[in-house]
Image (cartoon, rainbow, N blue to C red):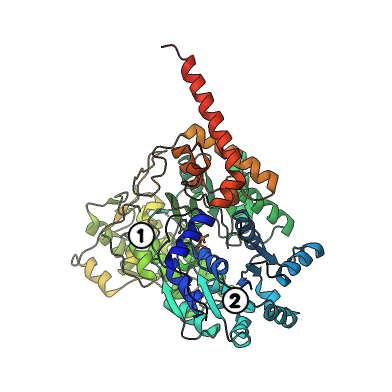
Amino acid sequence: MVSPATDDQLEATLTRYWGYREFRPLQREAIAANLEDRDSVVVLPTGGGKSLCFQMPALVRPDAGPGLVVSPLVSLMKDQVDGLVASGIPAAALNSSLTADERRQTHDALDAGSCRLLYVTPERLVGEGGDGFRAKLLRWDVQFVAVDEAHCISQWGHEFRPEYRQLARLREEFPEIGVHAFTATATRQVRKDIASQLALRDPDVLVGSFDRPNLVYRVLVRTGVKDQIQRVIDRHTGEAGIIYCVSRKEVEQLAAWLEQSGHRALPYHAGLPDEIRRRHQEAFLEERTDVMVATVAFGMGIDRSNIRYVIHAGSPRSLEHYQQESGRAGRDGLEAECVLLYSGADYARWRQMLEQSGELSDQARRLLRDMERYAGGTKCRHAVLVEYFEQRYQQDGCNACDWCLKELEPIDESLTLAQKILSTVVRSGQSFGMGHVIDVLRGRTTDQVTSRRHQELSTFGLLADTPIAELRGYLDQLTQQDLLLRTDGPYPVLQLTDDGVTVLKGQGSVELYRQPRPAPGQRRRRDRTDPAAWEGVDRGLFESLRECRMEIARARGVPPYVVFHDNTLRDLARRRPTSPEELLQVYGIGARKADDLGPIILTVIQEYEGHANAEAEDQPQ
Ligand code: ADP
């Protein structure tokens, strides 16, 4: 049993190595569990600061052995190790990307007890040759095991990786040390599954709030995908974003279109050769490209912290996926936007695709329905997401979603409109899908309409002037409000529920909303996000510092955020430090970074100020 470090020690370490003033929620508790060798499951949202929960114990533990971090992605490891080394923390990774020389150096460091954190993939640990490797770990006196992205162990999670299952061996083979699981997404079921699959012993379960207050959620019925994407991008000129598409073909098309329209955009999907994927990912992380157009293949462990928007050009298949993917925006805590463009047809398409791949279980259907409900829902998006993960949303309105920002327009005659639609469904025999019902309402004489003589229905053409997308939106809302039911199967048809029948009779209540047509460039300003975003920041100096960061990153072969996060640049451009002591007051600058990069940063600030003063003097009085 190690003696727990005191709070003071931990705080001093936080400032000295990371340049942060205080712990984020549950970090202290997670560190304590680690130092007490008590197993734990730590669930914090993306950007919640999970890494620190295992990095700091490795640093403050009295024994020299390393902490072991199991992480699924080699690229993710590299960034974390680079970041740690830049902050003066001896860390290394062992994986297939290393040269024999590099591997030997790391082994030497471990033999000498001078490596505090060791990152490995699950394959290295429990795959071929894993036995020998685990014997070495014993010799190196490994202090604890941290399993990152632990939801990969659960088949209920959204990124199941079978090799994670074998990690349970660690608990048996290293009985003395703690095993700690970390994840951002976990329903109760996934959480329980993680603990049992890893064979954790009475773990401390620490679950943070799933809410991400700095993310602004918007949902729009897909009317014209390019226009809609363009509008979002226009609100974020020169900023980073990800656009998720369902298919590879869509990725290719959108990326090509964006490039032609003058954006720095690249595609990413599993069908591209490894080499191209790696290049594109690096270009994005190194800030040489702004927009990544991708399938779900892109993103696990993407640590670019200044992603300002995530657009879904089609609906994902579950809210877990949505939360994980949209959660890649705004990791730096500053405002970012998550826009879901969807159509009711997305869900039929998913059902079909899942059926073809043999994955259409009851569970998969449920997950799809929950996703559909979110999309068509008419209440606070933050509340829906938080409640989905079985937490209570304490606030009264988030001021950060289309619903709370009153961007959805209530329809005055909702009941009459609902009756027109429901009545069309009934009159056409409750045996047609959305497309046909819409054709009848809009008065289109398609072959199907005429062959059934539906042009003779009294509701034919009743909503001739309403755009198709808008009608789809209403049908989705009626489905969400459980007035209509869409049957499963390859040809889903619409039917009325009991509540639907009540509304059709003119009883009961219904509220329908029209989606906004936002003015281009419309952007909400809030002052709620902490280090007050741009308040007091000298933009010119920020840009000079950004250039300097880019040069340092290039010279060192690391992504810019490993050098400094945007938050740190903003704080520098706000405080404009002139001495090493003042530098240490800046968010995200610890002693090592101040030593290493302080002189160059102070020079940039000095030069900028000198330049600004000279310009001021040149001005006529
Ligand atoms: P997660 O893995 O939970 O998504 P990270 O560990 O990558 O999150 O942390 C997100 C960001 O927050 C990182 O830039 C990290 O350095 C920063 N961070 C972590 N802990 C703190 C803290 N106590 N104060 C300020 N920033 C922090």
Is there any visible trace of residue 143 in the rendered image? yes
Image position of 485 (left or right of 94): left
How many residues crowd mark 2 within 10 Å: few (<14), some (14–19), many (20+)? many
166 vs 251, nearest the viewer: 166
Q: Nearer the viewer, residue 409 or 303?
A: 303
**Can you give x and y, in whole percent of width and height, for residue 470 in the image?**
37, 52
Q: Which mark is residue 516?
A: none
Local crowd size for mark 1, using a 10 Å CA cut-off: few (<14), some (14–19), many (≥20): many
Q: CA distance from mark 2 to mark 1?
A: 42 Å
Q: Give the residue number, with chain letter if any, for mark 2.
A: 143
Judged from this view, the residue extending furthest toward the top is 620
Q: Amino acid at mark 1?
A: Arg
Residue 331 % position (x, y): 48, 55
Rendered location of residue 82, percent (x, y): 64, 56
Q: Is the residue at mark 2 in contact range of ligand 1, meaning its CB lies under 8 Å from it?
A: no
Asked whether the viewer can see residue 314, the reply is no
Secondary structure at badge 1 equals: helix
- Name the secondary structure under disc 2: loop
**Label 1 CB sits under 8 Å from any ligand 1 atom:** no
Q: Residue furthest right?
A: 100
Disc with the residue nearer the chain's start (2 vs 1): 2
User: What amino acid is at disc 2?
Assistant: Gln
366 lies left or right of 560: left
> How far from the left and from the top, in percent, is residue 277?
68, 56
In the displayed structure, 515 sits above or below 323; it is above
Q: Circle 1 sits on which residue?
A: 381
Q: Nearer the viewer, residue 272 or 361?
A: 272
Q: Residue at x 52, y 81 (%)?
A: 1
Above or below, 203 against 592 in this view is below
281 over 122 or under it: above or below: above
Q: Nearer the viewer, residue 95 or 344?
A: 95
Quadrant that contains the C terminus: top left
